[in-house]
Amino acid sequence: MPISKVDAAVRGYFEHLKRATLLRAAIVGVALLLAGCGNSAQDGEIIGQAKKVTHRTPLICPNYVAFDLSLGVMKGGTGSMSTQDMWFTVAHESDIEALTKAVQAGAIVRVKYDTRRIAICTEAEILTAVEIVP
């Protein structure tokens, strides 16, 4: 068999292998994308002390408002170790005013939230409702 025929056969095999590998990678990528969509949990509820409302401005992603909830409640002031905090992305602009007032008062709040499977630019927990506990 001449070398040119062997060379052409090897090239054809590697081209087929490259196409098959790209197809497999595309299938795996689409499957991972579909599996990552949506929420991993919904209607979670937690009670803690309002600590901070922050306007985040990532370089690539759109701006959003984040809320810091302290799970270690202190009487007469806000404070806890950072490991006892949860960060939330505020979903509704109407909640920002209530959260800001709660932070200023150091109030205890009940937060309802959903958890995203994949959160690239924001916090994984999405605040859906807030209530100041009397």
Image (cartoon, helix red, strand yellow):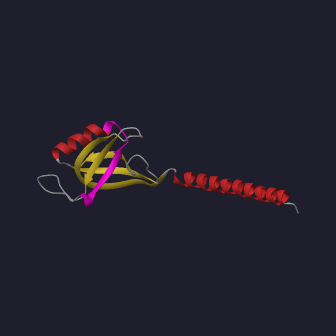
Query: Is 114 or 30 nearer to us in this picture?
Result: 30
Asked whether, in this view, residue 46 is left or right of residue 50, the answer is right
What percent of the width, then of the height, locates residue 108? 21, 51
Question: Position of 68 compared to 122: left or right?
Answer: left
Residue that lies at the very extreme toward the left in this rendered image = 76
The quadrant in which the N terminus is found is bottom right
Report the magenta residues as a range. 82-94
Magenta highlight on residue 126 = no
Is 40 or 55 nearer to us in this picture?
55
Left or right, 32 with respect to 54, comes to right
Residue 131 image position (x, y, % from top left): 28, 46
Tell me if 26 is positioned left or right of 44 in this view: right
Farthest residue, direction bottom: 1
Q: What's the residue at 28%, 51% (across, down)? A: 110
x and y, in percent, of residue 32 in the image:
56, 55
Residue 70: image quadrant is bottom left
Q: Position of residue 10 (x, y in %)?
A: 78, 59
